[in-house]
Image: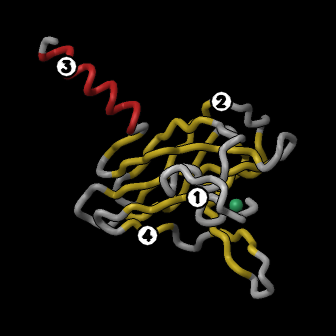
Amino acid sequence: MSFRSFVAASLAATLLAVPAWADGIMIMDPYARAASPAAKSGAAFMVIHNTSDQDDRLIAARTDVAKRVELHTHIETGDGVMQMTEIEGGIDLPAGATHHMMRGADHVMLMGLNGSLEQDAEIEVTLVFEKAGDVVVTIPVDNARKPEAGAHGGHADHSNHSN
Ligand SMILES: [Cu+2]
């Protein structure tokens, strides 16, 4: 294999593993899903890695597929019920930190979907970081994905999250 094709092959492998990487922010394993087939809302999940040496913060997100996008998390309301709430001030990403956006925890909430999130479709979401600026992420729709699949090495059957 020539050096050039070796580089091309390495680059291709890297691109497969790393959907978005800009300005010290790496987005890994993104996926989106609708709450149900007819749902008017959905959510996007991913792992965000701040590869830079300075603290950053995810402050907003935008997309054309929904009328409104919010950064959400789940809080326990006190009676054992988990409720979604908007994250005030965004999500802290200290230098070198990895943050899991996942079911039952932090997520990008897509409210007022302009169409249904079809299985295997791809949506484009722009994540807005305080320092890194806009990072555009192409996110595959995976309505069949089990909660936390991938986040713990592929175990998918030990979660009781309901989002
Ligand atoms: Cu939400």
Q: Which residue is mark 1?
A: 102
Quadrant assignment for the N terminus: top left
Hey, what amino acid is under mark 1? Met
18 vs 63, left or right, is: left
Mark 3 against mark 4, which lies toward the viewer?
3
Badge 4 is on which residue? 92
Q: How many marks?
A: 4
Q: Nearer the viewer, residue 23 or 1?
A: 1
Q: Tag 2, which secondary structure?
A: loop
Query: In the displayed structure, would residue 133 be above or below residue 87?
Result: above
Callouts 1 and 4 close, C-beta under 8 Å? no
Callout 1 environment at 10 Å: few (<14), some (14 to 19), or many (20+)?
many
Where does ligand 1 appear, by image quarter?
A: bottom right
Q: Nearer the viewer, mark 1 or mark 4?
A: 1
Three-letter amino acid code at the position of disc 3: Phe
| Left or right relative to 60: residue 85 | right
Confirm if mark 2 falls within 8 A of ligand 1.
no
Q: Residue at x 43, y 37 (%)?
A: 19
Extreme residue in the left direction: 3
Q: Secondary structure at mark 1?
A: loop
Which residue in the protein does label 2 denote?
120
Which numbered dot is residue 6?
3
